[in-house]
Image (cartoon, helix red, strand yellow):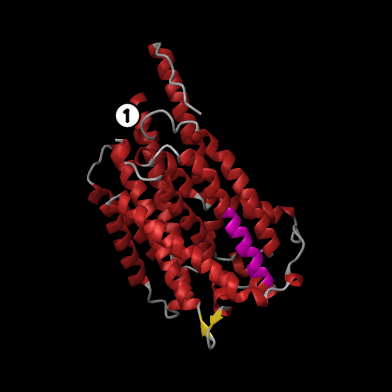
Amino acid sequence: MQDDRISSHYLMAALFISRILVSFTYIAPEGRRLSGTDVAVSSLLAALLCALCFFPAKRLLDGGGNLLTRARRCSPAFARGLAAIYTLGFVFAVFAAMLRFELFAGAVLFPDGRNHWLTGMMLLCAGYGAYKGFRTVSRASAFVGALTAAGLLLILFTLQGKARADYLRPPFSDGVGVVLRRTLTALGSTAEVAAIPVLSEKTDPRIKKTFLPWMFAGFSTLALLALFESAVLGRFGEKELFPAYALTAQATVGSGVRLDAVFTAIWVLCALVKLCLCFTVLCEVFASGFGVKNKLSALIGCGTVSAAAVFLTSGNPDAAKILISPAPLLLFLSMTVAIPLSVRAAEKLRDRRTGAVPAVNVP
């Protein structure tokens, strides 16, 4: 029923948090990072590509039912195949988020490497949040989103006096190729976009109008943060493994009280929201695609696989390379472009066989 739907703004808050978290726990490949201006350019290019990639899914939001429900009307086997792709994509998203955070925690919070307990606790808390339902996750997203925005404004306010324009290098100073690669990496890290057509039955129809503002806000914030990091940290920031943390370490209030611990706590909350969102999507995928209505079974299975993957790879110094490999981009394109196009093609084929009149999407 319409009254049971969640405001699309709550989902957009969760998506904003998910996108920002990637920057907070960004891992510079091989200790090398692009200049702030190049990162800003790549973020804006990624926003444009993301809008283009989302167009096939956007046209399917007005048809009744989420993407997997519509696929099941064409063929149950077809729906299960698409659900398998979604499962792989969002389990990988959970794995990537936790791998980033575990490497961050191991480098900053627990240098002795004994931080698996934190990963386990976060997965358990996120699983419990998803089990409580999308409404609970949505309310948490609104609170954490407001807290994150306030934290970013605090960074800008406290460090504005340390920013130097001469630290900023011209765009494409490292070449066009590296900027394009960074753009594709940023695009592959935006798997949360694929959550929209899966959760469309749980949100109001305004989601089609709120997507572009969310995307603009998310990627523009990343571009602004990258420029600010470069303006404050200079070339030093380009060599940092976690430049956003290095930036917060420079922020102080009062009599020299550092704010990095405060922002680390905010990042923990952001990670929980992202994990909750991914687990919520997985529960919906299992229900709509596989017919598994038991949330607990889906959460235990996906959580166990994700935790095992993180525990087995986090001790490997080269594990982070998978985050900049072609795998995330291929999963992103599969979930945001290939699946919606395949559902649309399957519906047209079904209508042609049955002689039914195709449903007209209302713009």
What's the residue at 43%, 54% (across, down)? 14
- Compared to residue 50, the image places residue 24 above or below, namely below
Picture coordinates of residue 232 (x, y %)?
66, 74
- What type is the residue that disc 1 sits on? Pro
Image quarter hosting the N terminus: top left
**Crowding near the residue tagged with mark 1, few <14, some 14–19, many ≥20 C-alpha atoms within 10 Å:** some
Circle 1 residue:
76
Please, is residue 144 above or below residue 84 in the view?
below
Q: Nearer the viewer, residue 159 or 111?
A: 159
Spot occupied by residue 145 in the image (x, y as percentages of width and height) = 45, 59
In the image, what residue occupies the spot 56% across and 69% down?
Answer: 244
- Place of residue 47 in the rendered image (x, y in percent of width and height, measured from the top left): 60, 48
Q: Can residue 319 be seen in this view?
A: no
Q: Quadrant of residue 219?
A: bottom right
Magenta highlight: main SS: helix
Along the horizontal axis of the image, is 247 left or right of 90? right
**Residue 149 seen anywhere in this rendered image of the structure:** yes
Whether residue 226 is in magenta: the answer is yes
Give the magenta part as a residue range.
219-231
Element type at mark 1:
helix
Q: Which residue is outermost to the top?
A: 355
Counting labels gives: 1
Against 293, residue 102 (above or below) is below
Asked if residue 90 lies left or right of residue 50, the reply is left
Q: Does the magenta stretch include residue 201?
A: no
Give the quarter of the image for residue 233: bottom right
Q: Residue at x 34, y 47 (%)?
A: 282
Relative to 171, 267 lies left or right = left
